[in-house]
């Protein structure tokens, strides 16, 4: 009886819009590849492709983390650069007891930073951009203050080294034999992280794919990921659906900081020095890549596959510009312009689909 | 002013959204000095048609003639210039500014570089006089201290400042008490006398019969007909709106065994909102809770479901004493709360229906931290059939559904948790007649299956038709209840809620 007559109006969107929305970034990759081949015949060589991937592998790790924050509807984690630097420094401090000590200490430090961010933003509902920006400043101040303006080299072990830093003075106090540690081999192991090429492919690239796949599984297959989707689409709805929204937001920020700390360790190893400037600019680039990959700034929409697409696209653009002989400064301007365009298009396409609200 | 001067004429106006023809060749005319009601179910195209008139779209097709002159309404500014005034359901108010600043936003009189306070005061008093508020409100008051009803009148005065030829009012009475509605109608009649053409959008049939001169009904984006209000009655209008005949819903005999107490509440208190509320709820019973705005009705629902803090009180559910800790705990215990705010607290409109319905049971459908969406398929299938949700595809984004179907999705979301006690806060707010009937039928069917329902509603006919028992709340206290044996009707319930008659000694 309640079978009211069929409403004949169309209820689905035209599929082209949806496809562009979902896979637009891969279409862009295709176009860029064609452009690349036209620019240089060696563009599609495996060496060049590997170069492109290698160049964006650090970005990929950071972006995979920040993607959780954006998926959560929180616009971005601007504390990522200093999280990278801080955890990198902590890794260098602890690696004198062994590489794994360093890595684990860095990841724990990352988790703590993420927990603080997540608590403040999830529980106290502070604006994420403002808070993480402040956090970035606090961390920068903390690193520069602890090190009294100096940097930390993995193989550096003079008396003076143990008077600065976060944990080094404590270590020196607890362990009288600390000067006897054979730092040369430990430092070589740490510095080797970024220059190891298992099967001819840089280690960091394996790590990036590992992080991306882990991120993909967490985001789309787990309980947490699915709850994050609801909370990301609307915090209030999530809360009123019996989801612990505070904890969900907190975990999203922890994912971001933990992934940033992994990138921080590799970045520090690549630079062979722990310093506050490690990771600068990665927040902005990561957000660009994520939005490019079709994730919506308003949360709850997009996937890790898109994030990889966005990261790869940025790599392609940078590679093509380099092949054309365009310098780094110009490339920065171009990246900025891409960011603005992508955000504008993202906002507009959402509005067109009638999804600009809540 | 000629009797039949046509103020507004729309000829074959259409508006296409991606995937939807929201307004399909609608022709529509309003005479000067008439109140023209525009009716239709949610999603029929009323709002879109009025948005075209307000200049929200630059890409409509068809012809619009205002005062005999073809016009183009491509921006809100153009529409204003042509004399279209809109009073929306959601008011546009800067709450931290004064009444007068709000009323003259954008055209505050100035003297040189400074605001001309004296002129502003004089103009705002003149303007307030149009809505009979000049004695009641000091124009210097901040808007946040003004009641909802008066804010609406102020908004109207603000629109009238531009001397519109056409005034569009979208559901102006949805938040008003019956007395306030009468005041509003008086003002509308005044404005009408000045020769302003009024388009009045409402779901509320009795109002239409009281205030409108003519009525136009839209359905599925098309115009069905325009009639004089004298020529139609309730049934014909409803039939025009939904395309079939619908009987008023009356609940048959309530479920037979209502003897087991499923929920016992003693002295439930949330300071400032709910005080010492005690009641018992039987299995299979529908308990209506009535109370004016601010009576603590919604807060009671929120406390019971764990959304709000419970300061003290005892809660026994199914012979188990419970200390309320939070929503997820209460959901696990079997108490579900359907919020009155569908768009902000109920549904994540950007997600698919599947995601929305299953959002409450992500944890339950998971194993070892992994979500198993396949396990939700039978639940979805069952709920879709039970609630006849159209279109029959859980992957569609919820925002693309009509209001009624969205409300069904919201109901499905809570039913998926298999609750023992279902608290429904305004389950049919802003829902069209057809969907409303189906939701009512579903509630009754669920109660017959043994589910206990607490129905918080300001829709008195709904409350009276569905409830086995009505509890009355006033100022945070439960002041008594009316049972079927006492014989309650809309009048008795209303009087009890207003505190004008004692509850237990209702005498006529």
Image (tube, coloured by chain):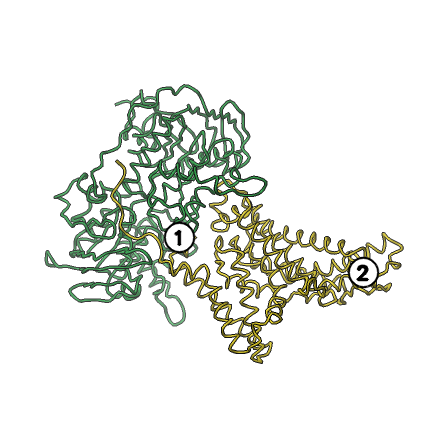
Chain colours: A yellow, B green
Quarter-of-image position of residue B26 = bottom left
Residue B267 in sight: yes
Who is closer to the viewer here, B275 or A120? A120
Q: Chain of mark 2?
A: A
**Disc number for residue B126:** none
Q: Is B387 on the left or on the right of A60, as rendered?
A: left
Q: Is B189 on the left or on the right of A225, as rendered?
A: left
B217, above or below A46, in the image: above
Task: Determine the residue positioned at 61% across, 64% down.
Answer: A59
B377, above or below A13, in the image: above
Give the quarter of the figure containing the C terminus of chain B.
Answer: top left
Give the quarter of the figure containing the N terminus of chain B.
Answer: bottom left
Residue B126 in sight: no
Q: In terms of secondary structure, where does tag 2 sit?
A: helix
Q: In terms of secondary structure, where does tag 1 sit?
A: helix
Q: Is B317 on the left or on the right of A7, as rendered?
A: right
Return the x and y of residue B377 as percentages of the image width and height: 44, 40
> Which residue is outermost to the bottom?
A325
Q: Please give the residue where the numbered disc 1 appears in the rendered image.
A: B143
Give a yes or no on whether discs 1 and 2 share a subunit: no
For label 2, count other residues whose C-alpha is less than 10 Å away and answer few (under 14), some (14-19) or many (20+): some
Task: Determine the residue positioned at 49% across, 24% down.
Answer: B318
Return the x and y of residue B229 as percentages of the image width and height: 15, 45
Task: Determine the residue positioned at 72% across, 68% down.
Answer: A271
């Amino acid at each position: 009886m309640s079978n009211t007559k069929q409403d004949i109006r169309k209820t689905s969107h035209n599929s082209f819009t949806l496809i562009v929305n979902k896979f637009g970034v891969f279409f862009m990759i295709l176009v860029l590849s064609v452009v690349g081949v036209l620019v240089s015949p060696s563009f599609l060589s495996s060496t060049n492709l590997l170069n492109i991937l290698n160049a964006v592998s650090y970005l990929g790790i950071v972006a995979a983390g920040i993607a959780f924050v954006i998926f959560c509807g929180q616009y971005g984690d601007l504390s990522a650069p200093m999280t990278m630097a801080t955890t990198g420094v902590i890794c260098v401090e602890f690696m004198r007891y062994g590489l794994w000590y360093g890595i684990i200490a860095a990841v724990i430090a990352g988790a703590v930073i993420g927990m603080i961010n997540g608590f403040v933003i999830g529980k106290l509902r502070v604006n994420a951009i403002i808070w993480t920006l402040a956090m970035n400043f606090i961390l920068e101040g903390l690193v520069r203050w602890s090190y009294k303006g100096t940097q930390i080299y993995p193989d550096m072990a003079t008396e003076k080294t143990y008077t600065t830093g976060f944990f080094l003075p404590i270590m020196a106090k607890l362990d009288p034999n600390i000067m006897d540690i054979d730092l040369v081999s430990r430092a070589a192991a740490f510095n080797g992280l970024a220059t190891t090429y298992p099967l001819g492919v840089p280690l960091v690239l394996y790590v990036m794919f590992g992080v991306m796949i882990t991120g993909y599984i967490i985001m789309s297959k787990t309980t947490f990921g699915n709850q994050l989707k609801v909370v990301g689409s609307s915090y209030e709805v999530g809360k009123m659906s019996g989801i612990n929204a505070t904890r969900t937001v907190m975990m999203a920020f922890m994912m971001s900081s933990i992934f940033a700390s992994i990138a921080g360790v590799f970045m520090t190893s690549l630079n062979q020095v722990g310093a506050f400037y490690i990771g600068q600019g990665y927040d902005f680039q990561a957000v660009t890549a994520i939005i490019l990959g079709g994730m919506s700034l308003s949360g709850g929409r997009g996937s890790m596959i898109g994030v990889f697409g966005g990261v790869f696209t940025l790599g392609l653009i940078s590679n093509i510009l380099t092949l054309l002989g365009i310098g780094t400064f110009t490339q920065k301007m171009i990246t900025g312009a891409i960011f603005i365009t992508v955000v504008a298009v993202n906002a507009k396409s959402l509005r067109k689909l009638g999804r600009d609200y809540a | 002013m000629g009797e039949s001067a046509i103020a507004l004429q729309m000829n074959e106006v259409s508006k296409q959204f991606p995937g939807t023809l929201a307004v399909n060749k609608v022709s529509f005319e309003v005479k000067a000095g008439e109140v023209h009601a525009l009716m239709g179910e949610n999603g029929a195209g009323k709002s879109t048609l009025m948005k075209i008139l307000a200049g929200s779209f630059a890409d409509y097709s068809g012809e619009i003639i205002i005062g005999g002159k073809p016009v183009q309404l491509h921006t809100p500014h153009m529409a204003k210039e042509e004399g279209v005034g809109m009073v929306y359901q959601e008011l546009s108010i800067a709450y931290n500014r004064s009444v007068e600043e709000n009323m003259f936003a954008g055209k505050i009189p100035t003297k040189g570089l400074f605001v001309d306070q004296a002129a502003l005061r004089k103009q705002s008093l003149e303007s307030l006089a149009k809505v009979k508020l000049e004695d009641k409100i000091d124009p210097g008051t901040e808007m946040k201290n003004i009641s909802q009803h008066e804010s609406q009148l102020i908004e109207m005065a603000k629109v009238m400042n531009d001397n519109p030829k056409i005034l569009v009012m979208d559901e102006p009475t949805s938040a008003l008490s019956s007395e306030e509605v009468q005041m509003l109608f008086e003002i509308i009649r005044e404005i009408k006398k000045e020769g302003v053409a009024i388009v009045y959008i409402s779901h509320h049939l009795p109002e239409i019969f009281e205030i409108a001169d003519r009525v136009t009904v839209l359905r599925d984006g098309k115009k069905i007909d325009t009639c004089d209000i004298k020529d139609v009655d309730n049934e014909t209008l409803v039939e025009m709106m939904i395309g079939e005949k619908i009987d008023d819903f009356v609940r048959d005999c309530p479920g037979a065994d209502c003897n087991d107490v499923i929920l016992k509440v003693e002295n439930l208190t949330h300071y400032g909102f709910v005080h010492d509320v005690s009641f018992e709820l039987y299995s299979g019973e529908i308990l209506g809770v009535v109370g004016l705005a601010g009576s603590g009705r919604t807060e009671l629902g929120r406390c019971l479901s764990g959304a709000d803090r419970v300061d003290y009180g005892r809660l026994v559910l199914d012979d188990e004493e419970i200390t309320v800790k939070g929503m997820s705990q209460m959901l696990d215990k079997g108490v579900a709360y359907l919020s009155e705010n569908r768009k902000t607290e109920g549904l994540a409109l950007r997600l698919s229906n599947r995601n929305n319905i299953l959002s409450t049971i992500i944890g339950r459908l998971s194993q070892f931290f992994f979500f198993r969406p396949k396990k939700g398929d039978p639940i979805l299938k069952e709920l879709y059939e039970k609630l006849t949700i159209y279109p029959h595809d859980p992957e569609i984004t919820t925002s693309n559904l009509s209001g009624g179907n969205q409300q069904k999705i919201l109901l499905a979301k809570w039913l998926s948790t298999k609750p023992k006690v279902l608290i429904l806060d305004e389950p049919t707010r802003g829902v069209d007649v057809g969907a409303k009937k189906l939701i009512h039928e579903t509630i009754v069917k669920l109660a017959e299956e043994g589910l206990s329902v607490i129905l918080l509603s300001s829709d008195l006919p709904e409350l009276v038709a569905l409830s086995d028992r009505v509890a009355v709340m006033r100022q945070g206290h439960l002041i008594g209840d009316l049972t079927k044996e006492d014989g309650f009707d809309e009048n008795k319930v209303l009087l009890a809620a207003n505190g004008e008659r004692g509850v237990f000694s209702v005498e006529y």
